[in-house]
Amino acid sequence: MHSPELLKGTLQTIILKVLKDHGRMYGYEITQRVKELSDSRLLLTEGALYPTLHKLEAEGLLKTETVLLGKRIRKYYTLTTEGKSLVRERVNELVDFIKTMSNVLQVKLA
Amino acid sequence: MHSPELLKGTLQTIILKVLKDHGRMYGYEITQRVKELSDSRLLLTEGALYPTLHKLEAEGLLKTETVLLGKRIRKYYTLTTEGKSLVRERVNELVDFIKTMSNVLQVKLA
DNA sequence: GTCTAATACCTAAATCTCTTAGGTAATAAG
DNA sequence: CTTATTACCTAAGAGATTTAGGTATTAGAC
């Protein structure tokens, strides 16, 4: 597992990108997908996930659709048009940041 | 410039690594060195820098030496033995985190 | 000469993100 | 029938950083 502090500032980008690549997803599914993609190195906590999803929705970057499976609620999230264009920016920004960091730390990432 | 949130959790690692590579340095010098290495993309604020230096010193990772230049004070920081061994860990951890991120975001860094 | 930018140290309140620690409830597995 | 997993959620607290101060010396421009 990684130090949780390193995750700070990257959660929104992760959520947006995973939603872009996978399409419609619900919260719990996102945590599982990230766990999978990261070989269990990145474990999103619900206390961080749900507030962030709500925030992204409030900002108009995500839209929701509530589905009932039997008696169970499931909230699906999808990127809005605005959200889609932001993903690109955010990912580029993060990649750029990573490259800058590798310069400062004088490490090679290949 | 990068989103400042991305910097969170990486400041200690940056300071430690720059000190390892450059040897004895003072606070202001560190900000300038990081600015240089990052092509002005990473600008350390003093409000973050000095408390972090003091914390690292309190933890025994850095030791200081105060020098007077005329009437001006300059505080040099050097890694302790303990500090040196931690740098490696921290840099490895960050590189590992970056690799994990690139998997999750499905981007290539080469 | 004097005004400004750069050098050089520092602290403290506010902010922002996330963790921790709860709460509720349905379904699956043993 | 008991536990793990699925599935949603909130709120208090912690931790790192920003913002916004404060002090003072030295160098450069005009």
Image: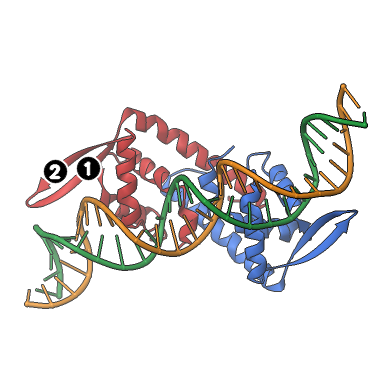
Chain colours: A red, B blue, C green, D orange
Evaluate whether residue A91 shows in this view. Answer: yes
The amino acid sitting under disc 1 is Tyr
Residue drawn at (14%, 49%), measured in percent from left and top? A73
Q: Depth check: B95 or C1 in front?
A: C1
Q: Is residue A45 left or right of residue C25?
A: right
Q: Is residue D14 left or right of residue B14?
A: left
Residue A12: give x, y in percent of width and height: 40, 44
Q: Chain of mark 2?
A: A
Q: Which is more N-terminal, label 1 or label 2?
A: 2
Task: Report, in whole angstroms, how far the alpha carbon at label 2 lies from the one at label 1.
Answer: 7 Å
Residue D19: give x, y in percent of width and height: 56, 41
Residue corresponding to mark 1:
A76
* Quarter of the image where one finds residue A60: top left
Would you place residue A56 above or below residue B71 in this image? above
Q: Depth check: A33 or B81 in front?
A: B81
Which quadrant, please, contains the N terminus of chain A?
A: bottom left
The amino acid sitting under disc 2 is Val
Q: Are marks 2 and 1 in contact (CB under 8 Å)?
A: yes
Label ID, residue B97:
none
Residue A45: give x, y in percent of width and height: 34, 58
Residue drawn at (73%, 46%), measured in percent from left and top? B32
Residue drawn at (66%, 63%), measured in percent from left and top? B54
Q: Chain of mark 1?
A: A
Q: Is residue B97 left or right of residue A65?
A: right
Q: Depth check: A26 or B102 in front?
A: A26
Label ID, residue A67:
2
* Quarter of the image where one finds residue B2: top right
Total number of numbered discs in the rendering:
2
Q: Is residue B91 left or right of residue D27?
A: left
Task: Give SS at disc 1.
Answer: strand
Residue drawn at (37%, 41%), measured in percent from left and top? A16
